Structure formats: C-alpha cells, structure tokens
C-alpha cells in the first residue's frame, strides 16, 4: 500500500513539475518563420473580396463564441487529413499565438486517415517551422514547432477520432470533396466551407515545390487574416464593455 501511495506521489510531483516548466517556457519563434510571417501579414490585399467575406463570417462566429465560453475549438476537415487540414491547423495555431489570442484550440481530421504527407511537411519547413517525425512509419506522429516552444503533436486521423472535440467546436471544411461528402459534422455548433486547391495533383512533377509552397502561403495568409480579424473583434467587444 505504501508503495502505491509513493508511486502516486511521484507521478503527481512529475506532473506538477512539467506544468511549472511549461509555465516558465517562453515562446520563441524561428527567425526564418518570423520573417515569413512579417511578409505574410503585408499581403492581405491578395485575398479576394469574396474570400474575405467568408473568412470574416467565420471570424465573427468565433469571436462571438468567446462572449459565451472561456475557450473554443476548431476542427479542420479535408478528405485524407494529409495536407490542407494539417496545414490550416498549424497556421491557425501559430496565428493565434502571433496575435496573442489564447482562448482557441484547433484540431484536424479527414474522411479517412492516411498520413501527413512529406511534401506538405517539407513546404512547412521551408516556411520556417521545425518538424520532426519517424520517416519509417506509414502514419507517423509529427512534432511541429514555430521555434522551440510550443510543440504541436499531429497525426493523420478520421475527423471523429477521440482526440478531436465532440462539442463546443466549429467545423471548417478545407476541401470541396469533404465539403460535399460530409454535409454534417456531428457535434459541431457551426460548419464553414473554406476550400483550398489540393497540391497533391502536382506530386511527382517539376512544379511540386512551387505548388506546395503556394498552398502553404495561401492558407497561412488566410489564417493570419482571420486571426487578425478575430483579434480586432475581441478588442471592439472589450471596448464596448467599458
């Protein structure tokens, strides 16, 4: 019995230690990603007016959720959870960090599980993210960080996977196939359609790098635009309460 309590005490101490370490760690962004981000936020004018309307609608909904909840979640959904949903998830996490909005968590999933595609990972690395994974695994667990901290752990999975939210979340459909094939995401408070072109059609072609980099840039720009919009709406709501 004493051994049991001793092990429990050690486990609790270890957990407390990890939490304290997490609280003392400072966010440190990679210089390359910081430069990339600075350039990205100056190109919002490249987003079409129609697209800005859709992004703003999503941003309005998310900002309003914070009036009723202390935190809220997003679930990015595409067909294979291999490229666009992961890329959007990563950029949204980072954009929230960039603008200092801490109340949101984001996740991703697909209509089927495959793997986080190496071409997408390589494009994210070229943008400045640091990525680690075991290339021998068919569906590896991938660690992604904008610098040294935080570290986001990702893996291809079905959108109903147990780690994904079941309530108190909005579903963002980032590909037209998933949008058509999955008209209802169970548990979602709201469902938004923000499709992106699939770079997989350029795999094994000379334009592969160009097309994947374009996808990463396009999704990054739009996630930053939406994060900036959400931040501005939060400020407006706070000012109105004074």
Image (cartoon, rainbow, N blue to C red):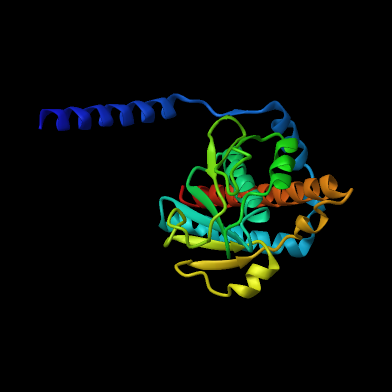
Asked if residue 149 can be seen in this view, the reply is yes
* Residue found at x 70% / y 45%: 118
Tell me residue 28's x, y (percent): 59, 27
Q: Nearer the viewer, residue 222 or 124?
A: 124
Q: Nearer the viewer, residue 131 or 46?
A: 131
Image-based side of 161 in relation to 94, left or right = left
Image-based side of 46 in relation to 12, left or right = right
Q: Is residue 221 above or below residue 201?
A: above
Tell me residue 167's x, y (percent): 42, 62
Q: Residue furthest left?
A: 1
Image-based side of 3 in relation to 10, left or right = left
* Residue found at x 62% / y 74%: 181
Tell me residue 56's x, y (percent): 65, 59
Tell me residue 157's x, y (percent): 54, 56
Q: Is residue 124 above or below residue 174?
A: above
- Disc tally is 0
Q: Is residue 46 above or below residue 152?
A: below
Asked if residue 41 can be seen in this view, the reply is no
Q: Residue furthest front?
A: 136
* Residue found at x 48% / y 62%: 160
Q: Is residue 142 above or below residue 207?
A: above
Q: Can you tell which quarter of the image residue 196 is in?
A: bottom right
Q: Can you tell which quarter of the image residue 40 is in?
A: top right
Q: Quadrant of the N terminus?
A: top left
């Amino acid at each position: 019995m004493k051994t049991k309590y001793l092990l429990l005490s050690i486990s609790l101490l270890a957990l407390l230690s990890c939490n304290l370490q997490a609280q003392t760690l400072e966010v440190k962004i990679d210089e390359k990603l910081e430069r990339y981000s600075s350039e990205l936020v100056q190109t919002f004018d490249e987003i079409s007016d129609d697209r800005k309307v859709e992004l703003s609608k999503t941003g309005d909904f998310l900002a309003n959720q914070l009036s009723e909840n202390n935190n809220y979640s997003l679930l990015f959904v595409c067909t294979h959870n291999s490229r666009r949903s992961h890329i959007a998830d990563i950029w949204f996490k980072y954009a929230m960090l960039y603008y200092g909005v801490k109340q949101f968590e984001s996740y991703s999933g697909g209509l089927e599980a495959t793997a986080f595609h190496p071409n997408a990972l390589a494009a994210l690395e070229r943008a400045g993210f640091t990525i680690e994974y075991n290339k021998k695994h068919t569906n590896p667990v991938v660690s992604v960080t904008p610098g040294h901290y935080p570290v986001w752990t990702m893996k291809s999975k079905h959108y109903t996977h147990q780690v994904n939210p079941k309530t108190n979340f909005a579903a963002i459909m980032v590909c037209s196939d998933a949008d058509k094939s999955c008209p209802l995401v169970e548990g979602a408070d709201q469902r938004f359609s923000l499709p992106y072109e699939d770079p997989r059609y350029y795999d094994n072609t000379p334009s592969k790098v160009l097309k994947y980099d374009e996808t990463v840039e396009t999704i990054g720009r739009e996630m930053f635009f939406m994060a900036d919009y959400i931040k501005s709406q939060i400020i407006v709501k706070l000012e109105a309460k004074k």
